[in-house]
Amino acid sequence: MTGLRRRWRGAVELDVAVEPRRPGDPAGVRALAYPVLVGEPEVGDRVLLNLNALALGLGTGGYALVVALPDRLPADADRPGHVVKARYTPLQAVVLAADEDDSPHRAVLASADSVDGMPVVIADLHSALPAVIAGVHADRPDARIGYVMTDGGALPAWFSRTLDALADRLAGVVTAGQAFGGDLEASNVHTGLLAARHVLRADVAVVAQGPGNLGTGTPWGFSGVAVGEAVNAVAALSGRPVGSLRISAADPRARHYGVSHHSLTAYGRVALAPADLVVPAGVDPALGVDTALEPLRHRHRVVTVPLDGLDDALRALPVKLSTMGRDLDADHTYFLAAAAAGRHAASLLRAAGPST
């Protein structure tokens, strides 16, 4: 390792010299280490790297990832917890689940069976999270927001610089399923929602995958089908599902232009319970949003939400907004749609009254 770069909660960025294997290979790479897993890296360390994401040129995960510091292994972990995540991989992590025996929250969660009508905004992509938060706080700056991070994208919450920058705007992060590294750990979305409500005392929750996204371009081959499953989980726990639609006027791919097929499939085919699907007011008619959503109206309630003040709220965020490499101005409709979903959740919170 030749140098240290940025660091944020749970992660440190490194410069690493490597021996090129083929003509044209770089002599150095940018790498990412998670000190909880591999120990604290120091300049001069030899590092074992996984180069797959870097070799594939992934937009979100374009790092070499540190697997180990072979000459200076971390001490054996001596932490409570019996839940294993990233199970049966070489870097499986043992965590303390919020509801297991040794957890201080065990008693509360053992008896919890409802989220008490809590509005839950469900989004396809991690990039929607800051916009949803901006929408909630635009009308309810006092609202406590819990984020339930699912395992469709990055598994370590530490990968997200967005979560680090938004820490003071969130009541906390619950990592669900195989995801790990949140303030609380949950075995699935259901227990994640219960933990957000009864441990974090969230007024509003947001459910979305971590950074990154799996998609094959086929009708069913994408990680966002979990959006529909999350709607069902929220309904099963007596919550109020709010669908943040993936709407874009800038995506060059026909399947994602207007209302993405990800949203249409997840809400139209996977979600078995009704949700409020939020459309930003004044959306360009050329995007065909109303027509695309017509088949979903038999199950869901389509809600149009005004946008006054939301652009300012988005621009005031402490993070740079980006989705698929496009910033706020390049994909304005996408971020306004997510912020409108947050605003709608805030309106439901007002109607329900403050949490107890």
Image (tube, rainbow, N blue to C red):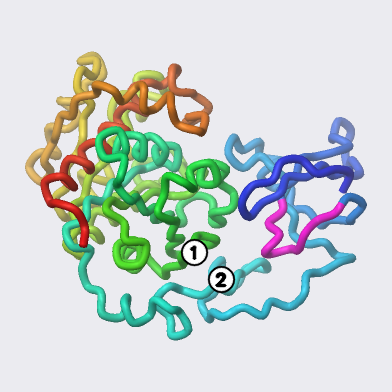
Q: Are marks 1 and 2 in contact (CB under 8 Å)?
A: yes
Image point (89%, 37%), residue name: 27
The reply to whether residue 139 is visible in this rendering is yes
Q: Which residue is mark 2?
A: 87
Amino acid, disc 1: Gln
In this rendering, position of residue 306 left or right of residue 58: left
Query: How far is the residue under mark 1 from the one under mark 2?
Result: 8 Å
Q: What is the x, y in percent for residue 15?
A: 82, 42
Q: Which residue is mark 1?
A: 178
Q: Report if residue 35 lies within the magenta region.
A: yes
In this rendering, position of residue 212 left or right of residue 282: right
Tell me where the magenta segment starts and ends, as one range.
33-42
Callout 1: few (<14), some (14-19), or many (20+) C-alpha neighbours within 10 Å? Answer: many
Q: Secondary structure at mark 2?
A: loop
Which residue is at the far bottom?
101
For marks 1 and 2 on the same chain, the one whose residue lies earlier in the sequence = 2
Instruction: Say which of 182 and 269 sits in front.
Output: 182
Instruction: Say which of 90 and 145 sits in front.
Output: 145
Occupied quadrant, residue 17: top right
On-image quarter of the C terminus: bottom left
Q: Secondary structure at mark 1?
A: loop
